[in-house]
Amino acid sequence: IREFRYAVEFQAVVLAMDNISHEQIEKLKANLEVLENSADEEEQVMSDKMIHYTIVEASGNRLVMANYLALAKIIRETRSKIMTNERKSMTFQGIHRHLVEAICNRDLELGKRALDEHFVYICKNMDT
């Protein structure tokens, strides 16, 4: 499932580089700010979700969107497990910063590295 999620999100990142609107960039930045600065865990989880959703939406691809939405429940469980540990949460926020910066700067190489870092982090921290 993680590999499928990676494939869906990577395709979203690739397509978003060309298709993201100014409004979607602003939405990414606003959600990143909440993720990094809110003390409320529920707000952080929602902002994390919205960052990924906005990237998927910016892809402009209905198949990517449909597959991402199908994975939503599993993704929600992953977020909750990771976001409950503050030290892990701070690292996870930094990874999201890299991902948002890559999309905003339309830097595909940085976007791939950020997404790789995101999934390595998920794999390492799901069982700890």
Image: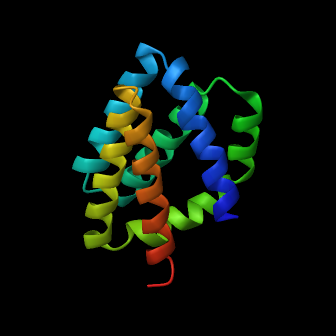
In percent of width and height, residue 9 lies at 59, 45
Instruction: Report how many numbered discs are placed on residues in the image.
Output: 0
At x 22% / y 48%, what residue is drawn? 37
In-image side of 38 versus 119 (left or right): left
Foreground: 100 or 15?
Answer: 15
Residue lying at the far left in this picture: please name it. 37
The answer to whether residue 44 is above or below residue 90 is above
Q: Could you say which quadrant of the image residue 65 lies in?
A: top right
The answer to whether residue 17 is above or below residue 34 is above
In-image side of 29 versus 7 (left or right): left
Q: Quarter of the image for the N terminus: give it.
A: bottom right
Residue lying at the far top in this picture: please name it. 22
Foreground: 78 or 103?
Answer: 103
In-image side of 51 versus 89 (left or right): right
At x 75% / y 49%, what residue is drawn? 70
Q: Could you say which quadrant of the image residue 111 lies in?
A: top left
Q: Quarter of the image for the C terminus: give it.
A: bottom left
Residue lying at the far front in this picture: please name it. 109
In percent of width and height, residue 6 lies at 61, 54
Foreground: 118 or 109?
Answer: 109
At x 45% / y 40%, what residue is drawn? 51
In-image side of 24 versus 38 (left or right): right
In percent of width and height, residue 76 lies at 57, 59
What colouring style does the render use? Answer: rainbow
At x 27% / y 39%, what residue is drawn? 33
